[in-house]
Amino acid sequence: MSGAPQARAKSAPAVAGPRQEPVLVFVVAGTQLAIPAGAVHEIRSTDSLAGEAAVLEQADFPWVRHTLERGGTMQYVVSVGAFFGLPRSRPSLVLVLRSVRCALLVDRIERMDALSTIYALPRAFQGEERRWYLGLALFEDGVVPMLNPEGLLTREHLERLDARHLAGAVPV
Amino acid sequence: MTTLTESVEAAYVLLRLGEQRFAVPAESVDELTGASQLHKFPHTTPLVEGVIVRRKRVVPVRDIASLLTGRALRMHRFYLVVRRRYGAVEEPEAIPVTGDCELLSGVIAFPRGDQQPDYISGNLELAGEQIPLLDLEKLAAAAPQAAGPAGRPV
């Protein structure tokens, strides 16, 4: 459409501009997701964790099926695909996160980007995604949501999971 | 497209969703753009399909057709980029539309009918056709409630 309107209502302040940050892009069931590179403490293959993970029997959070004990702290392994309701896939990696009690079960790493441009999540998104995502990373080939490391398991979730865990974890 | 020559207060952009036409105030419209690549990712906001990238801006796409006509647009050729206000902040938003849009000026909007929903702020009379004038803010608020991915408690 050409010929934009000549006069407009008084403009509202512009949205804060994008920021730049190193990110790690991973794939689950064909869906790309990103996470701040600094939030990842360790990347492990699922095979290498076989002796360290324990099965967590609980039905409230079907996307949490295993726990890891790291440095005396219990971490809950979140199946990212199950969390987002993605088609079933074959996860092969666990991203052990720093400073949160959460690890992510993912299919594979797509790439690491030293300096990605991150935009704020548009305000049109009003649901739980405001907690899940820190923003949207813009790449030449697409837009990838950047996970909030603290966004998938809330404090309330952790308290409920802790209660289930106390009821008894089964070693793998 | 008609060039805007008269009062901005009486200027509207006419858009087509399938077989139906609607209008929005011209002052809320940024541009009409050709179909861009739609980027989708998991979220729970009803009617929002994903985002497009326009001039290094990330623009959410809201499918208002399913709310207004009862069905999502199966094919669309353009996005009408409008400006939405969130408190003190304004952000762009793209609406998939079926065809070209038309800019009308000097048209008077009549009050909405008693039976029309809140998101219709009035009606334009054009060649015997009544064209609903949309209030985009109320339209977004009228979307059905968000639902989480299957099986996941909120």
Image (cartoon, coloured by chain):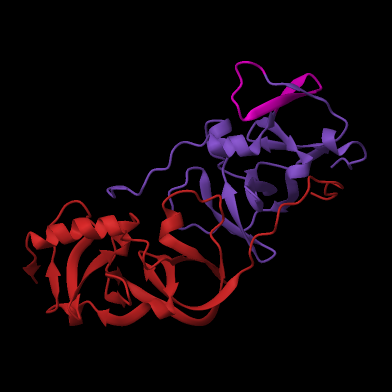
Chain colours: A red, B purple
Q: Is any part of residue A135 visible from this angle?
A: yes
Quadrant in the rendering for residue A38: bottom left
Is the residue A14 above or below the residue B28 in the image? below
Looking at the rendered structure, the number of numbered marks drawn on it comes to 0
Q: Is residue A110 left or right of residue B18?
A: left
Q: Which residues are magenta?
A: B113-132
**Residue found at x 65% / y 31%:** B19
From the top left corner, tell me how far across and down residue A88 is, in percent: 28, 60
From the top left corner, tell me how far across and down residue B145 is, in percent: 44, 38
Q: Is residue B1 left or right of residue B57?
A: right
Depth order, front residue of A61/B13: A61
**Residue found at x 38% / y 70%:** A27
Q: Is any part of residue B100 visible from this angle?
A: no
From the top left corner, tell me how far across and down residue B102 is, in percent: 79, 39
Is the residue B97 above or below the residue B109 in the image? below
**Residue found at x 87% / y 40%:** B2
For the C terminus of chain A, the quadrant is bottom left
